């Protein structure tokens, strides 16, 4: 058992070390921080979507913006699109689960808003459809996926593809990347630094 615990921790560290050494990913994080900061400065909104554990991660990251990250400051408009279960179950039942996010983006998304989509495979049909809808409305798309990016790669303005095919390791890295983005956006917008 102890051997397995150390192996799992080591695998998680290994993926993060690969991210740390990947200048392409570091550059994309920088660009995403700038884009998200600009959208908030211009009164835009940031939406998140995901399925299963990635839905929980999407909700977590939305809360970091709309609540607070490191310090008390003004709230930012960020929303996880799956939190209305009556809507979610009605649309899944009446239209199909693949439409649950695209219909909300159609209703809520405006030019210059941002949609983050979290999918370890990059192939979640409901997120791909949401990204297609977002593109048609000039909503900026930021994909957070695993290695290769899947179908979302073709619809992402910015793609953070974690260099792994292991779902738990990808999700752990999505939270790391999301936290980096939240911290740096908060710092840029409010000029405070706790470090």
Image (cartoon, rainbow, N blue to C red):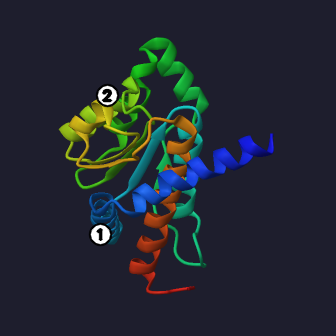
Q: Residue at x 65, y 45 (%)?
A: 8
SS at circle 1: helix
Whether residue 6 sits left or right of residue 44 in the image: it is right
- Indicate left or right for 79 with 52 as reference: left
Residue ID for mark 2: 129
Placement of the C terminus among the 4 image quadrants: bottom right
156 vs 77: above or below:
above
Q: Position of residue 137 (x, y in %)?
A: 21, 41
Q: Residue at x 52, y 68 (%)?
A: 75
Q: How many marks can you see?
A: 2
- In primary-sequence order, the first of circles 2 and 1 is 1
Q: Which residue is at the far right?
A: 1
Mark 2, other Cα within 10 Å: few <14 / some 14–19 / many ≥20: many
Residue pointed to by mark 1: 34
Residue 66 vs 194, above or below: the answer is above
Give percent across and percent down for residue 151: 28, 30
Residue 20 appears in the picture as rendered: yes
Tell me if label 2 and label 1 are in contact, CB under 8 Å: no
User: Dot 1, how many residues are within 10 Å of its Cα: few (below 14), some (14-19), or many (20+)?
Assistant: some
Q: Locate residue 188 relative to residue 35 in the image: left or right.
A: right
Q: Is residue 136 above or below residue 172?
A: above
Percent coordinates x, y for residue 88 in the rendering: 53, 27
Residue beneath the point at 22% across and 51% down: 111
CA–CA distance in space, label 2 to label 1: 26 Å
Displayed quadrant of residue 83: top right
| Residue 7 image point, x, y percent | 65, 45
């Amino acid at each position: 058992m102890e051997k397995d615990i150390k192996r799992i921790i080591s695998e998680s560290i290994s993926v993060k070390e690969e991210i740390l050494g990947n200048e392409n990913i570091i550059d994309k994080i920088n660009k995403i921080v700038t884009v998200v900061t600009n959208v908030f400065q211009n009164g835009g909104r940031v939406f998140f979507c995901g399925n299963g554990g990635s839905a929980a991660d999407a909700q977590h990251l939305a809360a970091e913006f709309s609540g607070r990250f490191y310090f008390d400051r003004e709230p930012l408009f960020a929303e996880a699109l799956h939190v209305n279960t009556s809507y979610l179950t009605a649309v899944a039942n009446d239209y199909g689960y693949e439409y649950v996010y695209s219909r909300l983006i159609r209703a809520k998304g405006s030019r210059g808003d941002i949609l983050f989509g979290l999918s370890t495979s990059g192939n979640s049909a409901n997120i791909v459809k949401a990204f297609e809808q977002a593109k048609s409305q000039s909503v900026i798309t930021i994909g957070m996926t695993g290695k290769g990016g899947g179908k979302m790669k073709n619809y992402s303005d910015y793609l953070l593809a974690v260099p792994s095919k292991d779902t738990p390791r990808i999700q752990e890295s999505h939270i790391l990347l999301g936290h980096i983005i939240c911290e740096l956006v908060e710092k840029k917008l409010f000029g405070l630094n706790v470090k």
